[in-house]
Image: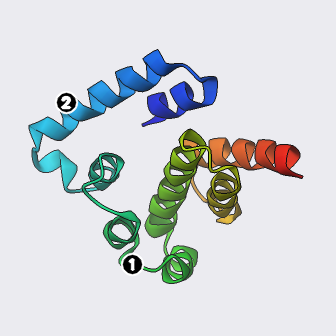
Amino acid sequence: MILYYYGVRLGRASIVENAWQWLGRVLERRQWRLKPWPGPLVRWFFGELDDSEILVEGCGTSSMENALKAARMDVLTRRHLIEFCFHRGVRAVREGEWSQSQEFFERAMLLQNTLVDLVWYLAKLEASLASRTNG
């Protein structure tokens, strides 16, 4: 999914397509690997899960408000929510929904990152870039 992000960010359709194909092969295998996290993210990526369903998978609740509360209390839930918000922001960028992408990147960035996680740092960068563009 990071490859997909790079393709979207760089505006390179070939990279987006490569990521789509690779993730599609992962999805086709349907092995046990898609049950634990980040497997649900792949299923969400292909539309098998909607936003509320991925929140249930990663945070134990279908509401963003409750997911944010849970993420403040649990490190693993926080990591899942950071990853979801980041990838949801990438989807919004791809769809040209700039204000929505900024909102998701900022949500990810504002969750205190207790782990060294590439996605958190990318979300922080994207939120900063979006605020310069929209501000």
The residue at 55%/39% (across/down) is 94
Crowd rating for badge 1 (residues with CA inside 10 Å; few <14, some 14–19, many 20+)? some
Q: Amino acid at mark 2?
A: Arg
The residue at 34%/63% (across/down) is 50
Which residue position is annotated with label 2? 25
The percent coordinates of residue 109 (x first, y second) are 68, 57
Relative to 127, 27 lies left or right: left
**By what rule are the colours in the image chosen?**
rainbow
The percent coordinates of residue 132 (x first, y second) are 87, 45
Crowd rating for badge 2 (residues with CA inside 10 Å; few <14, some 14–19, many 20+)? few
Relative to 20, 108 lies left or right: right
The percent coordinates of residue 61 (x first, y second) are 38, 80
Looking at the image, the residue that sits furthest to the top is 14
In this rendering, the answer to whether 70 lies above or below 100 is below
Viewer-nearest residue: 78 or 10: 10
Q: How many marks overall?
A: 2
Which callout, 1 or 2, points at the residue further toward the start of the chain?
A: 2
* Residue 117 appears in the figure: no
* Residue 128 appears in the figure: yes
Q: Amino acid at mark 1?
A: Ser
* Residue 62: mark: 1
Viewer-nearest residue: 63 or 121: 63
What secondary structure is found at the residue carrying circle 2? helix
Q: Quadrant of the N terminus?
A: top left
The residue at 40%/65% (across/down) is 51
Q: Quadrant of residue 112?
A: bottom right
Viewer-nearest residue: 113 or 35: 35
Disc 1 versus disc 2: distance between alpha carbons? 28 Å
What secondary structure is found at the residue carrying circle 1? loop
The residue at 19%/56% (across/down) is 35
